[in-house]
Every structure is written in C-alpha cells, then in structure tokens.
Amino acid sequence: MKNILVTGGAGFIGSNFVHLMLGKYDDINIIVFDKLTYAGNQDNLIPVEKNPRYHFYQGDICHPDEVDRVMQRFEIDTIVNFAAETHVDRSLMEPGGFIQTDVYGTYVLLEAAKKYGIERYHQISTDEVYGAVLEGRSKETDQLHTRSPYSAAKAGGDLMCLAYYTSFNMPITITRGSNNIGPYQYPEKAVPLFVTNAIDNKPLPLYGDGLQMRDYQYVQDHCEGIDVVLRKGQPGEIYNLGTGVETTNLEMTHAILRLLNKPESLIQPITDRPGHDRRYALDCSKVQALGWRSAHNFEQAIEATVKWYVDNEWWWRKIKSGDRYQEYYQKQYAGREINK
C-alpha cells in the first residue's frame, strides 16, 4: 500500500485517519478525495497540508469520471472509504442524499477498485446497522436491523462491498465502529454540540430521558483499529471496533458539565427522535485477535475531547456562527423542549 485514496478525508474520522497515517508511516502517500459538503472542512487538514506526501483533490464519489481521474493521476492502490452522509437527524429530514452517497457512491468506488485491480478496498461502516441491542453484544455475523435512513444506507453500502467480494473476488474489508468522539467533529453531533453549547452557557438539548446507551470511543483509537484491519484483516471479513463499555447519554452530558464546571441546569430535555435506538453494544473479540484494543477509556476520551474544543474555539466558532448551521439548529431543535 503506497498510494492510499482516503475518500471523505476532510471529515471528522477521515481527517484524523490522515493525521495518523502520515505520522505513523514514512513510505505512503495519502490522497484525500472530498466533496467538501457542510461537514467537510479543509481546516481539519491544516496539520498535514505542508507534508509532501499529502495531496488534496476535491471531488464527489458519486461522479465516476472524477473518481477515475484521481485513480489514474495518483496511481491509487488502496481505497479507504469514509465518504458518507452520517447524521441520523439529517437522514430523517432528507433521506435521498444518504442513499445517493452511502450506497451509489460506494458502488462507484467499487467499480473503480475493480477496474484498476487495487490491493485493498476498505469500507468504514457503523454499529448502527445492527439496530437496537437491548441485551448482549452485536457480532459481525448478526442480522442487520436498520432503523433510520442513515443506518439503512450504510448497510446498503456494506452489502454492496460483500457482493463485490463474492462476485469479483475483490480484496474488501469492512469495519463497523461505535460512536466516535475527539477533535474536528462537526458540532451537530451530541458531544461537540454539548461541549460548545456548555462553553457558551447555552442549553444542552438532550433527547428524552437521556438513558440511551452508547459506546463512546476516542477517534484516534478507532483510526488505529482501521489501520490494523487494513493491514491484517482478511478480505471479505467485517470487524467491529469499539471499547466494549457503554455509557448513557445522560452520563456523558454530566461528564461534560463536570469537566467544564458548568451547572446541570443547562440540560434541556427535548422530545426524542423517531426510532431512536436505545442501546448499541459491540463484541470486538474478532479485531482484538488481530492485536487491537482501544487505548482510551470513556473518562480519558471525554476529557481529551472537551480539552480540544476548549483550546480550539477558532475551529468551531466560525462553523456555529454561520447561517447554514443556525438554520439547521433551529429546524432541528426549536419547539421540542420538555418541561423539566
């Protein structure tokens, strides 16, 4: 693997993966291919922009001609696909874009991978494809039970990848990660939204009773796991990536307020979103057999995350002050308050 195409590399997890790979290896080139939607941000790549082994190409994975040009120009031998619409709330508002990017875009990349006979294609997926897991832990062989347009679109991309492995013997691996937190996460997701709202003494819009359970993993740990699977994983296989420890959203909220020394009165319960999965939990024994384990527990991950947003107001303030963000925020949360 010498010339790695990282689609969606200007997004949250993708940019952290780019930082990791360029810092960890001195014999690879990273080509970021990103459409630069609202969540794609070249500021995320400032730490590597002067690295001679980093290249940026603006493009859309749904456009075969653009994908073909970048494959030829940089002699791509590996694709790691982070490009996706990812926010469940937005998928409830506008499902079509999720199907287009997460399913059709995956198909376009798979066709390019087949055409050029690349060494490895890796698909970034999510634990949400398993649906709510009230007891036990999801294994990679479990039946998929998608409950939102987002998770359905991601499952569609996964199944397309597995079909290309079976039909065309393509060297495909898939990872399904739990909820990521850390630097550069667009502040529509719960943790960066709550941190930045709390810094400004604004209400934290918590869905329902806040007892939904999530496995919050530090984004750098997730990226390390992706790298392990990319190099050691078996083609045609899926690997879960998570800490194996669940935390309620209410506990997460309290942790943020405690770290920022803010009052719990900032918590504002709001009506729950439709089809909100109560619990996700992953069995990660398969990837652990390859030598990977999450290095941060929840307390370490949330502390590092909060510190980053405190130290990097330059990054998130210009996002949250923009008209597009403000319009989304009002559309999503206005009028949903529940009396405490």
Image (cartoon, rainbow, N blue to C red):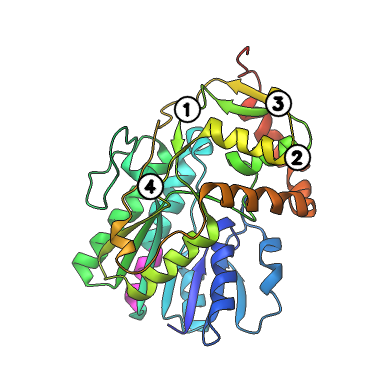
Point out residue 214 in the picture as x, y percentages from the top left corner: 45, 40
> With respect to residue 290, does 177 lie above or below?
above
Q: Dividing the image into 4 quarters, which one contains the N terminus?
A: bottom left
Mark with earlier residue (1, 2): 1
Query: Picture quarter containing residue 52?
Result: bottom right
Image x and y of residue 176, in percent: 37, 54
Q: Is residue 162 left or right of residue 265?
A: left
Residue 203 image-quadrant placement: top right
* Residue occupying the far left of the picture: 166
**Most distant residue in the top direction:** 339
**Mark 4 or mark 3: which comes first in sequence?**
4
The residue that disc 3 covers is 266
Which residue bears the numbered disc 4?
A: 127
Region rendered in magenta: 108-115
Q: Residue at x 49, y 73 (%)?
A: 5
Mark positioned earlier in the residue sequence (1 or 3): 1
Q: Position of residue 304 (x, y in %)?
A: 64, 53
